[in-house]
Image (spheres, rainbow, N blue to C red):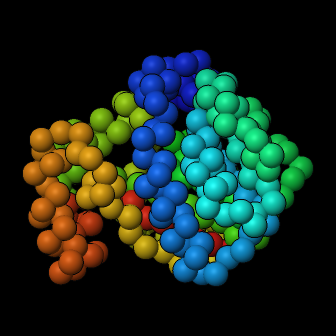
Amino acid sequence: MGKNIYTDGKYLENNQAWHTEDSAWKTKQILKIIEKNKLKPSSICEVGCGAGEILNQLYSKLPKTNTFSGYDISPQAIKKAKTKEKERLSFYEKDFLKEDISFDLVMTIDVIEHIQDYFSFVKKLKEKSKHQIFHIPLDLSVQSVLRIKPILKQRQKVGHIHYFTKETALEALKDCGFEIVDYFYTGSAIDLPSKSIKSFLAKLPRKILFKINKDLAVRLLGGYSLMVLTK
């Protein structure tokens, strides 16, 4: 699966809202890790910004940040994002890695699982920022492997071509030369509206087991992602 689905309109066809319905929740998670680690970035960039709603919401939450910049290779996504531009908030239909720029903080929110050579991509991010925030879906769990349909659905509908556990995600970032500063689980399957009866029925056992043993709940039942701060 190549990057063409993000430029030829196929991805927009399958995801009309470009996931903006989840942006408020994702913004809350990003602010949590920023505030927890007392970061005060003067410049923030989101690579793979999509329709730009995460940056748009961060803009109002972080008034002391001087610039917010969003980059995406999709003309359809940037067309949506451009409607949100204002002073201090800009969007670019460009390959961020080819730009001679740097930022205090670079974010990739649900991005690396889409990229064929994500190792090269991630390594280059380190050269362009003091800190990095990654949000990585943890698609691999006992239930997803046994059922297999959830993994195939993620591949076909939203373009996931790499699948992670907490351990493999953190080790991959370390292999790319990053120092892990902080991380925590985020529970989209728990916090966001259910998209099927099965996911609705799974909410309660996920919540209960997560309170007992977080790692075990994520490994067995899935439904979680990983928010990671690196430098």
Q: Is residue 70 above or below residue 106?
A: above
Residue 64 in sight here? yes
Question: In this image, 136 relative to 75: left or right?
Answer: left
Q: Measuring from the top left, give residue 64's x and y in whole percent.
A: 75, 67
Q: Measuring from the top left, give residue 27's x and y in whole percent.
A: 52, 57
Count of marks, rendered view? 0
User: In the figure, residue 140 lies in which quadrant?
Assistant: bottom left
Q: Measuring from the top left, give residue 95's x and y in whole percent.
A: 75, 38
User: In the figure, residue 52 lies in which quadrant?
Assistant: top right
Q: Please, which residue is most extreme toward the right here?
A: 100
Q: Decide which of 129, 49 is in the foreground and name it.
A: 49
Name the quarter where the C terminus is drawn: bottom right
Q: Is residue 97 above or below residue 30?
A: above
Q: Decide which of 205, 114 is in the foreground and name it.
A: 205
Q: Measuring from the top left, give residue 128's x and y in whole percent.
A: 80, 60
Question: In this image, 133 relative to 88: left or right?
Answer: left
Q: Is residue 174 above or below residue 89?
A: below
Residue located at (14% from left, 55% from top):
202
Residue located at (57% from left, 43% from top):
53
Residue located at (71% from left, 62% from top):
63
Question: In this image, 52 relative to 199: left or right?
Answer: right
User: In the figure, residue 224 lies in which quadrant?
Assistant: bottom left
Residue located at (61% from left, 61% from top):
61
Q: Is residue 49 above or below residue 169?
A: above
Residue 159 in sight here? no
